[in-house]
Image (cartoon, rainbow, N blue to C red):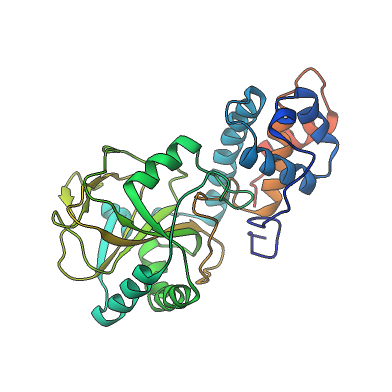
Amino acid sequence: MEYKKSSCFGQSVTRVSEVTPRQSKDIGLLRHLLKCNDLQLVQKVHEMEKYGPEDDPVLARFRALRTDLSRMSWNSFVAALGDCDAGPLARTGMMTFPLDEGFAMRLATALLASPKTEMRRDDFAMGYVGTAGAQCEYLNACNEYRAFTPEGMALITEFLQTVGLGLEKILGHAFRVGSMRQFQLVPERIASGRHLDGWPVAIRKLFILPQGCGRSTGTTWFRQRDGKQLELESDRPIWVVFENSVVWHAAVSAKALRPTIEFDLLPARKTSLEPFYAGLAGWYPWFPVEASLLEGTRLALAQCYPDQPDQRIKSRLRRLVGKHWG
């Protein structure tokens, strides 16, 4: 099953008191985690990544191995779903749509009434790609983040229910919300440059721009799949969906604060229009389903210790090669 709020994916867990930054440097402790059951192992690794030192060499090795398994898992999951690159979006990689002005005003009002907040390294759901401390500082300088309120979430749910069927047709496959955030683009603080996000390519981004966009308020540059380059310009509310790991894009510096609501859209077996908040620093799940999170985390950690071969790990690797995950 794909992850839901009730499963271990994305679940908040109590901080593991016995895991401290000092202990996370202890190679023996990490090796000992392989004796835990799968869920305990995922929970404890999650706490180490949230609260432990970012320069731990063993964790760095683990992350590199997990990244490889993550990409393999997403590729297999998408292949099992069928062609996720055949919808109308695939023609150019970016599409824009009008947003009802009355509804957009309600969205903007709710966003601006929400309390200000900041991205923190420890604010990401279990099983999710997080954000390094230095990157959090940079993003906080570029964006004025706002917390989600019940009123805002109700409006976001209304938006998803309104556009959901059309969005599924635009993508060409079922989807679910992987994560979301809302913010105002800070004037004169953009320096990211033209880039691809480097995510699994079947994950896409959606922006709601309830006050439009342009050079006066900040916008986004795109180089579409057909080679056409453009900057979004609209004096009316719009929403935008784009292939953030296929289409080159870049923020264009704002002259005034620009409200934005952002979603990360994941390919899925069945469309879900339920909003999901994975923490301000959470982006997308390392693995598409819960079973592959549990198995992939153990495989990545076990490969950090090749001096102690484990027949069960070898068996799991053979299963990984021989079947689709998900």
Can I make out residue 86 in this image? no
Q: Is residue 160 above or below residue 323?
A: below
Q: Say whether residue 192 is left or right of residue 316.
A: left
The spot of residue 85 in percent (x, y) is: 40, 53
| Residue extending farthest bottom | 102
Q: Which one is in front, 16 or 180?
A: 16
Q: Say whether residue 19 is left or right of residue 190.
A: right
- Residue found at x 68% / y 43%: 47
* Location of residue 305 (image quadrant): top right
The spot of residue 120 in percent (x, y) is: 51, 47
Q: Which one is in front, 142 or 271?
A: 142
The spot of residue 97 in percent (x, y) is: 25, 68
Q: Say whether residue 6 is left or right of residue 254.
A: right
* Location of residue 257 (image quadrant): bottom left
- Residue found at x 70% / y 61%: 7
Q: Say whether residue 286 is left or right of residue 263.
A: right
Can I make out residue 276 in this image? yes
Q: In this view, does 205 lie above or below 27?
A: below
Say which quadrant the N terminus sits in.
bottom right
- Residue found at x 45% / y 35%: 134
